Structures are given as structure tokens and as C-alpha cells.
Amino acid sequence: MGGWAIFCAICGGPFSSQVDMDCEGTDERAYRFDILEDCNLEWLDKLRALGMNPDATGSDKSFLTGSGRYFDYGGIEVVAGNNMNIPYPKNEIVPMVAYHDFAEIGTPHVFPFHSVCYEVLRRCISLRKPGGIRGHTLYQVFEHANGGRYVRLQLDYGDPDPPAEQVWENLRGQEILVVNPVDIPELESEISDIKCLLDTKIYLGNETKLHEEDIFSRLPIELRHEIFKHLRPESILALKAASRVMHATLIPRSMWEAKLVDTYPWLWEVLELSVFQSQEIEEKASRLLLACSEHGESTSKSYGYTLGLANRRRIWR
């Protein structure tokens, strides 16, 4: 029967950038070349692993390895790394077994994942509860979902559901499963444009006249705040961009952050921006959020970052 593949504990994806692509886009067992031709798939090759060392001192006996690769039959090779709990010299290349000791020789198992996916998980966990990932707790969660002789965890990995067969299946229409969910060049370009504007002072002349012609100037500030409470983040930004009065109306930072976390928890690039400096920035940020909120099919070319964000959202959930 030959060997078998294992898959990422966090995203369910493969540990190989060597995927089948079809230039014609008609092969059901291959990804469409025109969808992935500009995507860097090397992130799929880079794995790390979480393990447990029962002989370690302290209450947290988990360890996180350095980078490594998958080589077959459930086995991986990793650089031991400098985690204090790992029972190997930090520069040593160590063979380990993923998920289960298939050979039944008493080898401890570890849980493999893409380095990129660990970053998504770290941000997801720290979003509502600041602090790093607790390795011991994460290991227990993985172990609880580690049922049977399997090649990934027994979890719902979202839609589309990553294949979990003997080898990775390249299915037409499921290209998002292999697109980098963290490094999204098109999104980074949009964010970079906004950051450049953050350093630009924008002034509006004849401010008094603008206030007089602005219908929102008739509303007391309490009602303006009530309006903000009932709008989505992109609508708040659009309103502020359209109205000088609403732009000048401060929105509590706690309210804004809560709305972003509830609506776009996976879009940390915007969470880290101060977007209320000018109406031009508010307009750009509003358009960006609108673009990111569209689910889009994997064939969509309206926004170059749809695929990466779609995969990020799938993993996040």
C-alpha cells in the first residue's frame, strides 16, 4: 500500500508544496493553475510540532520543536530547538512520530502543524485573553481530539473540508486549502497604503461651513454615539468618511475594538491600525473591510486577497 501522508493539526492541510495543478482547469483531481500561479506554497513545507516530556520539571511539561519536515509513514524530522522541556540538544535533528506510534514500539507522539497556522492560532487565543499559548493545555486539547489510528485530529476543519485520505487529494475548487492564510501580499499592499496615509496630515478648510451644511450637526453627540452602536465597522468608517461632523465625533476605543473583534476577529491587520486620523483613511479602511467581508468563491478575482483570507477564516473558526 505504500506510505501515507499526515496533515496539519490546526488547518488539516498537507505538509508538501508539491501539489498537482491543471492549466486547462478541467481535471477534477488537480488544482487550477490560473488560481494558484501567483501563490507561494512553500509555507506548506514548514512544520513544527508540539510534544510532551513527562520527565520535565515544572507543571508545564510540553515542548515546541524547531522547524522540520514530513518524510513519510507518519514520521517527521525536526530541529530540536531551544525549548527548555525538549529532551534533546537544541541543534540536533530529531525523528519523531506524528499523532500515533503506528509501529507500536513505544515512541512518544507529537502533534505537527504549519508554522504559519500556529501564528493564526496564537492570535486567535490571545485576541480575547492576552498572553501566549499554554503548551500543556493545547497538548491536552489535541490529545482529546486524537482518536484512533488517524492522520489528523478528529475535528471539523471547516468548509471546504480538507481531505484526510492516505495521500492528499488535489480537488478542483478547493484551492483555498493550500493558500497562505497569514502572508497575503495583496492585503499587505492595501494595509501599507493606509499606513502611509497615517503619517500624512490632512486639513479641511472652511470647517464651520461644512458643519452647517452637515445634517448630522443637528444631532446631539449622544445620538451620534447611539448611531455608531448600531453600525458595523465598515459602515462606521463610511459614515465618518462622508460626514465631517461624524468624523469629528469621537468613538470610544473600547467600542471600536469590540466591534472589530466581534465582526472581523481574523483581520488583525486592521485591528492594529488607528484608522480615525482622516476621512481619506476612513474611506480606504471602509472599502477594505467591505472587500474582506465578501466570502467569494475560489475563482473570484475581484480581490486578490480573497483566497488567503478565506483560508484564514476557515482555520480561525
Image (cartoon, grey):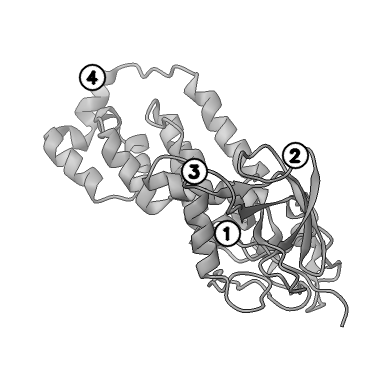
Q: Label 1 near label 4: C-beta < 8 Å? A: no
Badge 4: residue crowd in 10 Å (few <14, some 14–19, many ≥20): few
Q: Which residue is mark 3?
A: 58
Q: Which residue is mark 4?
A: 208
Q: Earlier in the sequence, mark 4 or mark 2?
A: 2
Q: Position of residue 8 (x, y in %)?
A: 66, 62
| Left or right: 282 as drawn, with respect to 243 | right
Disc 4 to disc 2, C-alpha distance: 69 Å
Q: Amino acid at mark 3?
A: Gly
Q: Residue at x 40, y 40 (%)?
A: 130
Q: Nearer the viewer, mark 4 or mark 3?
A: 3
| Left or right: 188 as drawn, with respect to 138 | right
Q: Which residue is mark 1?
A: 310
Disc 4 to disc 3, C-alpha distance: 65 Å
Q: Amino acid at mark 2?
A: Pro
Q: In the depicted view, which residue is nearer to us: 200 or 163?
A: 163
Q: In the depicted view, which residue is nearer to us: 193 or 170?
A: 170
Q: Earlier in the sequence, mark 3 or mark 2?
A: 3
Disc 1 to disc 2, C-alpha distance: 39 Å
Q: Is residue 192 visible?
A: yes
Q: In the depicted view, which residue is nearer to us: 167 or 28?
A: 167
Q: Secondary structure at mark 3?
A: loop
Q: Position of residue 167 (x, y in %)?
A: 78, 74
Badge 2: residue crowd in 10 Å (few <14, some 14–19, many ≥20): few
Q: Amino acid at mark 4?
A: Thr
Q: Position of residue 199 (x, y in %)?
A: 50, 19
Q: Nearer the viewer, mark 1 or mark 2?
A: 2
Q: Earlier in the sequence, mark 1 or mark 2?
A: 2
